[in-house]
Amino acid sequence: MLKAVILIGGPQKGTRFRPLSFEVPKPLFPVAGVPILQHHIEACAKVPNMKEILLIGFYQPNEELTRFMCNTQQELKISIRYLQEYSALGTGGGIYHFRDQIVSGSPEAFFVLNADVCSAFPLTEMLSFQKEHGEPNSFVILGTTSLNHCFTLRSRLLMFFIQVLHYVEKPSTFVSDIINCGVYLFTPDIFQHIGTVFQKNQQDMLLEEPTNGWHRAEAIRLEQDIFTALAGQGKLYVYKTLSFWSQIKSAGSAIYASRLYLNQYHTTHPERLASNKEGGPKISGNVYIHPTANIDPTATLGPNVSIGTGVTIGAGVRVRESIILHGATLQDHCCVLNSVVGWDSTIGKWARVEGTPSDPNPNDPYAKIDSETLFRDGKLTPSITILGCNVTIPSEVIILNSIVLPHKDLNRGFKNQIIL
């Protein structure tokens, strides 16, 4: 049997995803019409002999997370449990802390997936790869090729054929064009290696004044603490995927991830893609529309648009490369480009809300995106435009490359600003 672990982090991370993470935990933010986390779970549920999916993080259990888990369990017919960390323990510390729950039932192997990535998740292929190329108790990292301008994206791997000989986390100079995708296949033997690091951490704590030593000993990172030690020992291998992969760190990367998942729906969920129908809006490219949305037939949507529950779109509206969230209203003849329109927000008639595309390369469907922070050198650097929850944009107002939060009367155009 197999299991899967999805590391969902917690509320004190995801700062680059603000203000979208103010209203909903980042793993539950909808991308291509469904929560980010659902893409991971659906991929895991398709793996033969998958018995259970464990979510590990330090979010407080809440109604929204519980409802999502219950609905997803019923839909996919697979067990899903949430294991709450008492504090942020790192990618290795979290699975080590809950190792008894992971090995319960004696799984032969288990996947570990970071929740802040989007991917085709070739999990079955990773299993076949491990059986064909690795030792019985070897471990597999999902890797992909980085573009030259994105050297700081994630960890770099130096490989000889498929075995990892050297592992460097976020190098300052070129090491390899292969990057770690944050998706792993482990056997239970991984806990011996994590345990060795934990014991070393405990010993180091004894030499210092004890201050919350248990927590400090348990805070373990797979990338820096485990992989660097395993490299060159014949235990660590890379399965290089040629399919899409990207991080979901910033709000801009959510739109890019939505594009990638919408394109994947042609093979995985064609029923989620809208099509041109008599009496319906004009659809250009890949578009997701929730069945509860009310859209005027003169509107034009796409490409790469996701329309959430209860959205109202008026006559002559144009939406492109955007995510429109629950309950939003787009009044007649407004235009929304490269933007995220927040929950229950309203865009007035003839208003224009536009951001700058954050694509790394629009001509490369698998290009990697670099997740920018909202601020650099004290200055706001948004690319896409983000409207927070319950924002109202009056008629004929122009908003460009801005982050707009509620409680402000907008009566003119804004560019490159945070509007509180």
Image (cartoon, rainbow, N blue to C red):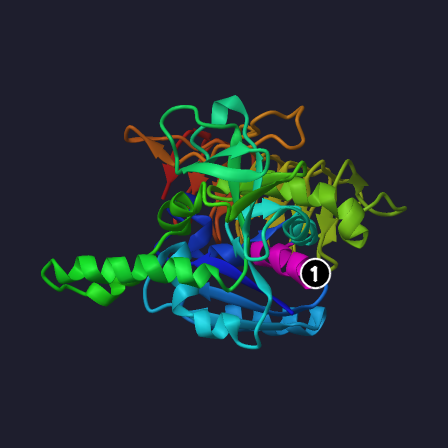
Residue occupying image coordinates x 69% and y 49%: 125
In which quadrant will I find the N terminus?
Answer: bottom right
Q: Which residue is situated farthest in the left direction here?
A: 209
Look at mark 1 in the image and give the residue it sits on. 47
Residue occupying image coordinates x 88% and y 46%: 277
Q: Main secondary structure of the magenta part?
A: helix
Q: Position of residue 160 (x, y in %)?
A: 54, 32
Up the image or down, 346 lies above or below 246; here it is: below
In the image, residue 224 lies in the stretch drawn in magenta: no
Stretch of the chain drawn in magenta = 34-46
Q: Position of residue 381 (x, y in %)?
A: 40, 30
Instruction: Name the quadrant containing residue 368.
Output: top right
How many marks can you see? 1
Q: Which residue is situated farthest in the right direction here?
A: 278
**Mark 1: which amino acid?**
Val
- Identify which residue, 364 or 52, lies in the foreground: 52
Q: Position of residue 228 (x, y in %)?
A: 39, 43
Circle 1: is it few (<14), some (14-19), or many (20+) Cα within 10 Å?
A: some
Q: Secondary structure at mark 1?
A: loop
User: In the rendered image, is residue 299 in sight?
Assistant: yes
Residue occupying image coordinates x 28% and y 62%: 199
User: In the rendered image, is residue 273 in sight?
Assistant: no
In which quadrant will I find the C terminus?
Answer: top left
- Identify which residue, 14 or 334, lies in the foreground: 14
Up the image or down, 186 lies above or below 235; here it is: below
- Identify which residue, 362 or 299, lies in the foreground: 362
Q: Is residue 58 left or right of residue 147?
A: left
